[in-house]
Structure formats: C-alpha cells, structure tokens
C-alpha cells in the first residue's frame, strides 16, 4: 500500500508522522515528504529534522527546509521559532552571509531584524564593516513591511560594532537617525544609547597606537571587547582588568597621574557605566550612594583628622603653617603701623602744632591706600598660588594614596565620602577642603573604588 493513502488526512497528522518515523528509514521518509503535495507546517518541521540525519548534507539544509515552509506558510510561528534557534548557532561567516540572503527572500517583515541579529554579529566580527553594510542594504531592499521601532533596535545593536569598526560619518548619521526617533525607544534602549554615545565620545578622541602591557591599553582593549565579543564572553576581559585595578593602588595612580585636568579622562564615563552594568548583572545591584550611619561617619572623621595631623607634623606642613601665620599677621602689622603714626602724630602736634599732626595723619591714610593694590594684586594671588602648590604636593604624595586605600577598605562610594567629608570642612580641617577639591576631578578615585567590588 502507498505510504500516504489518498484519503483525507486524520485529525491528528502528528501521530501518523510519528508512526512513519518509527517504521521508515530517514532517507525514504524524507523522499516521501518532499513528494507530498499538500504539506502542513508539521511536515516542514520533520523535513528540517530529517535533513540533519542525511549522510550527505549541507550546513543550511535544516534552514532551507524551514524557509520552504515559511514560503508556503508565512505566518506560522513554529517555523519561525525553529529558524530563530538555528540562526543562533555558531555558523561560519560564509554560511551566515548566504543564509541572510535566503532569509531575506522569504521574511519581508520587521521580524527579519530580530530573527537574523546573531548572523549579522558573526559577519561583524569576521568581515569588513563596509561589506556587511552592503549586504544589509541588499537584504533590506526586499523588505516590504516593517516598523521603525524594529529597525531602531537593530541599528542600536549594530552600533556596538560600528563605533569601533565603521567610518565616523556612518556612526554619526546612525546616531542622528536613532535620536530623531528616540520617542520609540524603550527605557532599556535609552540606557543603551547613552552608553554608546559615551563610548563613541571616547573612541573618536582615542589616539590609536600599538597595544602594550600597560593598564591604559588593557582598559581600552577590555572596553572594546565588551562591545565586540559575544554576550557570554564580553564580561571576562573587563572583570580581569577590574581585578588588576583593584589589586594595585600604585598602578592606578601611575596610570592616571593627572588628577586636576580641565578635560576629564575620556575613558572614565564609559568605563564607569559598563562597570556598573556588569556589577548589576553579576551581583544584582548597582554601586550607588547610600545613607551613612554614625559608625561610618566616625571613620571618615578619624581619617580626615589623621591626614590633618600628618600634614601639620610634616616639614612641608610646618612651612605652610608658618607662612600662613605671617600672612595672617599682615592686618596686625597695619594696625601696629597706624598706632605708630598716632604716637608720632601726637609728638609732632606737641612740637610742630596742628600742621605737623595733620601731615602725619595724611601720611598714614596714603599708606593705607597704597597697601590695597599690593594686597589685592600681589599678596592675595601669591598666597593662593602658594596654598594651591602646597596642597597639590600633599595630594600627590600623601592624601591621594590614603584616600584610595580608605575607599577600598571601607567600600564607600566616592559620593558618600564627599558628602560626609564636606560637613567637616569648617571644623579646622583645612586639608579636607583641598582633598575634596582634588578628588572631585580625579578619575583614579572612581575607577579604583568601583573595581573593589570584584575582590569581595
């Protein structure tokens, strides 16, 4: 009797197919299914599965069967679900490119983007960006029905590669396209866009050079890997770099020697953003400011008092305080000079009369007026310069390292430390004022403190 008798199909064709699978060799069953005129989606499911059991087969035979089914049943969710899974296999670049062209012939709606995203990733990692864009244009030419939000999500994903591999004009125009349609972005996509913009700002200003063993080069490579590697691999280089950062305060200080630059370190913002995202994904929370209890407040106060005491006891601190004392005495010296003029004026008045006393008073007034420009244009600027110079030397040689170690030991967020320390600035803690001024622009403070979570 024939394999498929010419009678109406049973109510449950799956049972018939399962019996045929048990009774028939795969090659024979495959031939029967191909010859069947009125196929259902389930027939294409089985053909795809059987294609993988054939002794001679191509890498895309499974997908080809599904695409043939999609051509006959464009809206069948099962066929698309199987094709979705197949597109996430580690295919060779040439196979991925060929499959993209075949899928574009059958899938003309906006599911094309989400369906084929992993295939584009394969090409992005293995081919020139311009070649991939040319293939994308070829595929998009066949699309007849898509929504803007689907293309937005896809272009946002494409930018992860584009900011590192594409020409600047393409990156800028893609950012513009996304921003013009930003109302369609989800909150997650908005966060992704912010991260990509920060990273692009860093990338376009980064001076390309041969990679070396230094921390700055490792950070650059780790940041790049985060965007280019597959999702299951992208965190590893970044975390390895974070562990290296957290393990050596001296390395961090030498890598970021400039702590008061007018231009912030370009890598700081994307590095912090990626670091916070990884911590959230791996540990379930993001590093953030928190309310401090009295115990932490006392630790901060003790730290500041220790730094103040060490500063004042050092030779440089004694010099600073001595100069401060002399500068502070300038008002007393002016008053003393005034008192001297009064004494001299009184003596002159008794000897030379009213005219002599007035002359002395005029001389005193002229002297005071002459002191103002000296005070305003000479004494005060020189004193400010001297204080800044002394504070920079202390921050470089003492305060900075102590601050980094304190943040590492306490696991405090730098913003928590700044908020608590700011309340103590008016309590005879001059060093705290300068320390806070310097740490606010010091990239090492934020990079080093964030990395500590990977040592816990």
Image: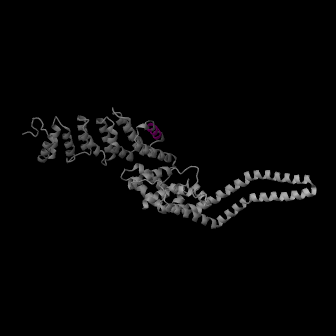
Magenta stretch: residue 401 in it?
no
The quarter of the rendered structure image containing the C terminus is bottom left
Where is residue 111? Give x, y as percent: 32, 38
- What's the magenta bit mostly, secondary-structure-wise? helix
Quadrant in the picture for residue 240: bottom left
The quarter of the rendered structure image containing the N terminus is top left
**Front residue (pair 90, 365):** 365
What residue do we see at 64% from left, 60% from top? Answer: 390
Q: Residue furthest top?
A: 144
- Left or right: 134 with respect to 423? left
Is residue 73 in view? yes
What residue do we see at 91% from left, 58% from top? Answer: 350
Magenta stretch: residue 173 in it?
yes
Q: In this view, does 35 lie above or below 243?
A: above
Magenta-highlighted residues:
171-178
Where is residue 307? Give x, y as percent: 58, 64
What residue do we see at 49% from left, 58% from top? Answer: 292
């Amino acid at each position: 009797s024939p394999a498929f008798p010419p009678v109406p199909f049973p109510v449950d064709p799956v049972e018939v197919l399962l019996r045929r699978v048990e009774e028939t060799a795969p090659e024979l069953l495959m031939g029967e299914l191909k010859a069947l005129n009125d196929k259902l989606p389930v027939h294409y499911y089985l053909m795809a599965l059987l294609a993988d059991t054939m002794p001679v087969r191509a890498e895309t035979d499974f997908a080809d069967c599904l695409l043939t089914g999609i051509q006959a049943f464009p809206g069948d969710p099962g066929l698309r679900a199987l094709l979705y899974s197949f597109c996430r296999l580690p295919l060779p670049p040439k196979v991925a490119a060929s499959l993209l062209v075949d899928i574009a012939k059958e899938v003309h709606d906006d599911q094309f983007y989400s369906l084929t995203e992993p295939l584009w990733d394969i090409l992005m990692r293995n081919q020139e960006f311009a070649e991939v864009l040319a293939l994308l244009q070829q595929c998009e030419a066949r699309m007849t029905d898509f929504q803007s939000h689907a293309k937005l999500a896809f272009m946002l994903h494409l930018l992860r590669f584009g900011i590192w591999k594409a020409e600047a004009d393409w990156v800028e125009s893609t950012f513009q396209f996304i921003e013009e349609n930003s109302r369609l972005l989800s909150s997650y996509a908005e966060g992704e866009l912010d991260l990509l913009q920060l990273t692009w700002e860093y990338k376009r200003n980064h001076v390309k050079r041969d990679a070396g063993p230094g921390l700055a080069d490792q950070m650059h490579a780790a940041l790049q890997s985060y965007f280019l590697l597959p999702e299951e691999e992208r965190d590893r280089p970044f975390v390895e770099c974070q562990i290296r950062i957290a393990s050596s305060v001296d390395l961090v200080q030498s890598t970021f020697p400039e702590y008061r630059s007018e231009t912030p370190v370009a890598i700081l913002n994307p590095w912090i953003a990626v670091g916070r995202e990884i911590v959230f994904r791996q540990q379930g929370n993001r590093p953030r400011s928190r309310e401090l209890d009295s115990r932490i407040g006392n630790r901060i106060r003790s730290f500041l008092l220790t730094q103040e005491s060490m500063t004042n006891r050092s030779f440089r601190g004694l010099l600073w305080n001595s100069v401060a004392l002399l500068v502070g005495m300038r008002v007393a010296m002016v008053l003393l000079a005034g008192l001297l003029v009064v004494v001299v004026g009184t003596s002159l008045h008794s000897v030379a009369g009213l005219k002599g006393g007035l002359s002395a008073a005029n001389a005193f007034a002229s002297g005071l007026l002459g002191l103002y420009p000296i005070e305003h244009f000479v004494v005060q600027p020189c004193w400010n310069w001297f204080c800044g110079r002394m504070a920079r030397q202390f921050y470089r040689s003492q305060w900075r390292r102590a601050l980094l170690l304190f943040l590492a030991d306490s696991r405090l967020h730098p913003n928590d430390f700044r908020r608590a320390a700011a309340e103590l600035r008016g309590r005879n803690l001059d060093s705290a004022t300068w320390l806070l001024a310097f740490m606010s622009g010091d990239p090492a403070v934020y990079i080093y403190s964030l990395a500590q979570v990977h040592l816990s």
